[in-house]
Amino acid sequence: MYGKARILMLTAFALAAPVLAGSVTAASAEGLISIIVIDPANPYWLTEGNVAKAEAEKLGYTATVGASKADTNTESRLIDTAITNKSVAIILDPADASGSIGAVKKAIAANIPVFLVNAEINQEGLAKAQLVSNNAQGAALGAQQWVTDIGEKGNYVELLGAPSDNNAATRSNGYETVISQYPDLKKVGSEVANWDRTQGHDKMQSLLQAHPDIIGVTSGNDEMALGAIAALKEAGKLSSIKVGGFDGSPDAVAAIKAGDLQYTVLQPVAVYSAKAVQQADSFIKTGKTGAATEKQLFDCLLITKDNVDKYTAPFTLSE
């Protein structure tokens, strides 16, 4: 597992060819690995798919990438396609912590091992591995920086990710664990914005109308934070309201450089997407992933104005 020290994340894959969900070409000698992400319109999931595909091809496999758009029916159809195409493994970012269990079971029934990335499902012992960011650790990092930037007194609001994703609650709880230590910081409102920039903008407008005196915004991801920043700019309030993000996306880094965003918590997606494929390769060849546990946590890194220049590629912080 990667520790809290600065990590040199692999950059070779982060700018890989765009995600495609097209037809499968003739399988290589090693076979087909099917990769299913949520939505490549989001740079985080784009990188997730690109890295996994590049790693699979580096190891001699054919690889395809599909997107579920967080819809379990679409996810199920993509699993069906992976089964029909005789995939040797599936790399899956699950659409729903509970709702994706059936899709995983269907793949297993077809004797195809499944390796989960980014998000967990609510049942252990099905997937061969679940590789995710240490969201609690990352949220604590972000919250500590947020308090440093905002001060120890005032009202704030929160933008929450999709309730179907356990990461949303884990990050929110991680923020709360730190911020609750400061009794004069009071959360006066929260809205679910489903990881989406447009929803982040619209929900921020509503929160600002209801709570015009806030001094800060915590956000479960960068896209919602960037939407909030746009709304605050429109209202002429960004200079007095500080916003924090989570993901480490290129747009968030640009916002830090511009002075619009206080920080972002970098998820090491470029590391564990490649690691999931490596473990799939190991399992295909040896029957073992090489990891000590099914669930594996990868620590996050904090990006602020002080180290933002070390961001050298998407979701990559160099030493």
Image: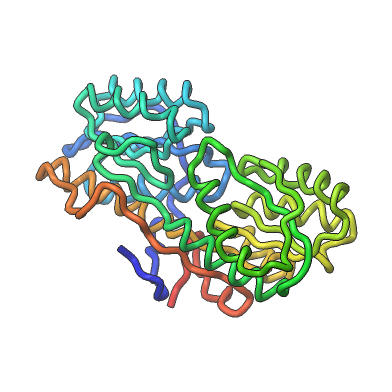
Q: Residue lying farthest front?
A: 183
80 left or right of 112 in image = right
- 40, above or below 269, in the image: above
Which quadrant is the N terminus positioned in? bottom left
Quadrant where the C terminus is found in the figure: bottom left
Percent from the top left, x then y, of residue 297?
36, 56
Image position of 6 with respect to 127: above or below? below
Q: Is residue 263 above or below residue 305?
A: above
Q: How is the image coloured?
A: rainbow
On the image, the x and y values in percent for residue 304 come to: 60, 73
Instruction: Choose top left, top right, bottom left or bottom right for residue 35.
Output: top left
Name which residue lies at 33% across and 39% down.
Answer: 91
Q: Residue at x 26, y 34 (%)?
A: 126
Say which residue appears at 21% left-offset and 35% top-offset.
Answer: 31
The residue depicted at 49 percent of the width and 37 percent of the height is 38
Number of numbered discs on residues:
0
**Where residue 310 sits in the image (x, y, percent)?**
52, 75
User: Looking at the image, which residue sits at the far left?
Assistant: 286
| 234 lies left or right of 20 | right
Q: Position of residue 235 (x, y in %)?
A: 89, 55
| Image quarter of residue 242 | bottom right
Q: Is residue 141 left or right of residue 209?
A: left
